[in-house]
Structures are given as structure tokens and as C-alpha cells.
Image (tube, helix red, strand yellow):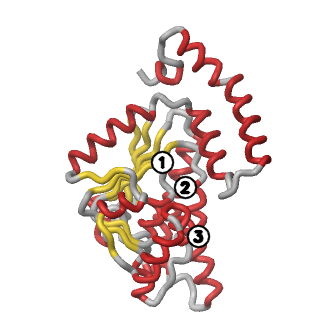
Amino acid sequence: MVDPVLITQAGGVMYVTLNRPEVKNAMNFAMVDALMAAFEAAETDDSVRVMVMRGANGVFCAGGDLKDFSAGGKNADDIAIGNRRFGTLMERAQRFPKLLVTFVRGAAMGGGFGLVCVSDIAIAEDSCRFGMPEVTLGLIPAQIAPFVRARIGLTETRKLALTGEIITGKKAKKLGLVHHSEPTVEAMDHRLLKLLEQARKAAPGAVAATKKLLMDMGETVTPDTLDDAAKQFAISLRHEGAEGTRAFVEKRPPSWVEGDA
């Protein structure tokens, strides 16, 4: 049996490759479970600083494998439970305490579109196709809709979700769905290398705390939000911040950068 997800590690980076090329890396339950396991492994491995998610054979992900997702049972409750499994994966990815990068080529449809929306940084090919085609199949983008809205706002989400429109990587960048859109895979590789070089300068604990702070924030700033941020700042200053500020004064790299050398 072919592994639905391939994993390699190098230089503090876990590379996770969606590996069902015969169906353009459409997600089935086995892939969802394998991705959950990958997040757990990366989260508990202190040597992993960044996860890069990509797809085999030049395609990121064609969406959900509808045959698999509808095979769990004939009644609505069983189907809902199966659908919710993917939402659990999205929640896990959203809360992943390390840097999550998506490297998006070919297509990112449905669930693949959703995975891009929960990544911290997305690098796409100009010609890559993005979309939520669920309504054209008589379905709804149930689990991804909240994450897409959080990424690009209600207005643009309505336009894409209610029409099933397909957009390119260039358009995805204009919408803020992806951060970088490149003309070739070579340019994407170069962009990724520069990104990883910059990411290694960030303290692991500070990244985790900052990401949690951002994810916990509502749309309105409240005194509680600022109170919690102040407490987290004080904690960081006593730990990694002490080393970081000392290294700055001494004009040397901090320990987390030296450790990668």
C-alpha cells in the first residue's frame, strides 16, 4: 500500500508531501489521519522548526475524495462525522505552534484550498488553480468556509464560495490568499529557501507564543487581549528574550540560530 503522505526532514524542516498522485492528491480518510500524525510528530520534535506541505507530481491537492468521504455510512449522521474529521485536521493545522508553509503547484481545490488558508505562509505558482467548486457539485464548503473567511474576508469568500469560480495564483496573491506567486517552480524553490533562511532566525518559543496570541485574538481589541499579551511578553523576556537581547548587545547570533549552524 502506498503511503498517502511522505515525510522527510532536513535542516530543521519537516517536508510533508501529499501522495495520491493518481487522484491529484485528493484527500481521503487515510490521508487526513496521516496528516494529523505528521502534525503531532512535528509538534513534539524539538528539532523541527518549520513544516513545509506540498503535493506529489506537481499538484498540491484536488480537494476531498468524495467517494471516500461518502462511503462511511448511508445516513446523514455518519456522513457528518466523516466530514468533521477534516475540520479537526484544519483546527490542528491552524493551531500548529511552529511555522507552517504551503508550497502550492497545479491546483488547490476544496480541502486543498482550505489547507492553504491555515498555513502561515503560502507560496504558489502563478498558473496554479484555486477554488471552492463545492456548489457546482451541489455541495457546501462546510469545513473550510470559516478558515477561508478568516483568510480573505467575507466579501471575497462569498464570491468564490457561492459561484465556484476558479482563480489563478496571481489572483490568489491579490486577494491575500497566498503571500508569494512565482512564474516557475525554480522561482518558488528560491523563494522557499530565502523564507527558510529567515525563519531560522526566529526563536521557537517566541514563534509558538506569537502564533497563539494571534489565533486567540478576536476581531475587536479588548483589555483582556492586551493584558494577556503583556503577560506573555514578560514571560518571553525572562526566557528566550533574555538570550536574544544579550546576543543583540554582544553582536552575535542567538543560541537558536547558532544551533542550526
Image location (x, y in percent) of residue 179:
39, 51
Residue receiving disc 2: 93
Q: Residues within 10 Å of mark 3 (few under 14, many from 20)?
A: some
Q: Quadrant of the N terminus?
A: bottom left
> In this view of the protein, which residue sits in the foreground, 143 or 12?
143
Res 45 → quadrant: top right
Instruction: Check if mark 2's residue and mark 3's residue have beta carbons within 8 Å.
Output: no
Q: At 26% across and 51% down in the image, what residue appears?
A: 182
The answer for how far apart the CA atoms under marks 2 and 1 are is 8 Å
Mark 2 and mark 3 lie on one chain; the one further toward the N terminus is 3
In the figure, 54 relative to 206: above or below?
Answer: below
**Residue type for callout 3:** Arg
Residue receiving disc 3: 85
Image location (x, y in percent) of residue 43:
57, 44
Residue 100 has which mark? 1
Q: Residues within 10 Å of mark 2 (few under 14, many from 20)?
A: many
Res 246 → quadrant: top right
- Judge left or right: residue 53 versus residue 208: left
Residue 49 has which mark? none
Q: Secondary structure at mark 1?
A: strand
Q: Residues within 10 Å of mark 1 (few under 14, many from 20)?
A: many
Q: At 70% across and 32% down in the image, what residue appears?
A: 233
Q: At 63% across and 52% down in the image, what residue appears?
A: 215
Mark 3 and mark 1 lie on one chain; the one further toward the N terminus is 3
